[in-house]
């Protein structure tokens, strides 16, 4: 059990991992994180007591998968690039797992909500750098999807007694 009740600063934690990946591959690294988040949402959904909470969490999982698919579609050879990223950075999955392990679900939700907000800001930043208007629109749409999931988690947290 993680005895630290504070929520970690995800930007600080993931910055070194991002910096180890080439700039053009960073969206693919983030897409990998989206898929890991989708798995986490499904785990939370399976453990949820209320059907309404389960449905909301499954919708979040679907958004994460949608984001990853949209980003991967922008990058030819995405699957091979992502395998290469994971091979060169074997600690990424462990880093992701260790952020959540041993924490109460409410803290996990808070961490993930922060991650969704950070993701939205990141996609907007990447969108600003795009010269291709269709790619810019994809990144901006992903930012909105991230914010929808953040709002779900924040609402669930605020509903807790």
Image (tube, rainbow, N blue to C red):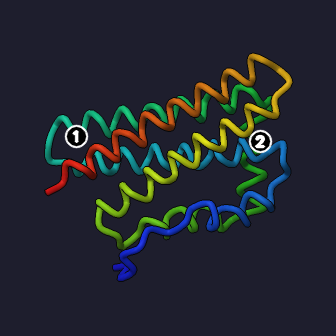
Q: How crowded is mark 2: few (under 14 residues within 10 Å), some or many (20 or more)?
A: few
- Please state, as top left, top right, bottom left or bottom right, where the C terminus lies in the image: bottom left
Q: Residue 98: percent from the left, percent from the top?
A: 49, 70
Viewer-closest of 85 and 154:
154
User: Marks 1/2: CA distance?
Assistant: 35 Å
Q: Nearer the viewer, mark 1 or mark 2?
A: 1
Q: Which residue is drawn at 74% across and 27% down?
A: 74
Residue furthest to the bottom: 3
Residue 17's place in the image compared with 112, above or below, is below
Q: Residue 76: percent from the left, percent from the top?
A: 80, 29
Residue 37's place in the image compared with 132, above or below, is below
- Please state, as top left, top right, bottom left or bottom right, where the N terminus lies in the image: bottom left
- Is residue 107 shown left or right of residue 29? left
Q: Residue 80 carries which label?
A: 2
Q: Which mark is residue 105?
A: none
Viewer-closest of 6 and 71:
6
**Snapshot quadrant of residue 139:** top right
Viewer-closest of 127 and 59:
127
Q: Which residue is drawn at 43% across and 50% down?
A: 113
Q: Which mark is residue 53?
A: 1
Q: Which residue is drawn at 25% across and 50% down?
A: 158
Q: Residues within 10 Å of mark 1 (few under 14, many from 20)?
A: some
Task: Find out whether the residues at labels 1 and 2 contact each other: C-beta distance under 8 Å.
Answer: no
Instruction: Give the SS element for disc 2.
Output: helix
N-term mark: 1 or 2: 1
Residue furthest to the top: 134
Q: Residue at x 36, y 55 (%)?
A: 109
Instruction: Give the SS element for disc 1.
Output: helix
Q: Residue 118: percent from the left, percent from the top?
A: 57, 49
């Amino acid at each position: 059990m993680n005895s630290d009740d504070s929520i970690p600063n995800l930007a600080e934690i993931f910055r070194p991992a991002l910096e180890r990946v080439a700039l053009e591959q960073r969206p693919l690294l983030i897409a990998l994180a989206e898929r890991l988040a989708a798995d986490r949402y499904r785990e939370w959904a399976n453990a949820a007591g209320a059907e309404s909470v389960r449905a909301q969490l499954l919708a979040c999982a679907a958004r994460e998968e949608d984001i990853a698919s949209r980003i991967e579609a922008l990058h030819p050879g995405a699957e091979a690039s992502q395998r290469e990223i994971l091979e060169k950075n074997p600690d990424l999955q462990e880093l992701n797992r260790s952020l959540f392990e041993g924490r109460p679900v409410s803290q996990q939700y808070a961490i993930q909500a922060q991650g969704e907000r950070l993701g939205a800001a990141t996609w907007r930043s990447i969108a600003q750098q795009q010269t291709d208007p269709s790619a810019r629109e994809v990144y901006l749409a992903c930012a909105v999807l991230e914010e929808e999931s953040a709002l779900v988690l924040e609402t669930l947290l605020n509903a807790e007694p």
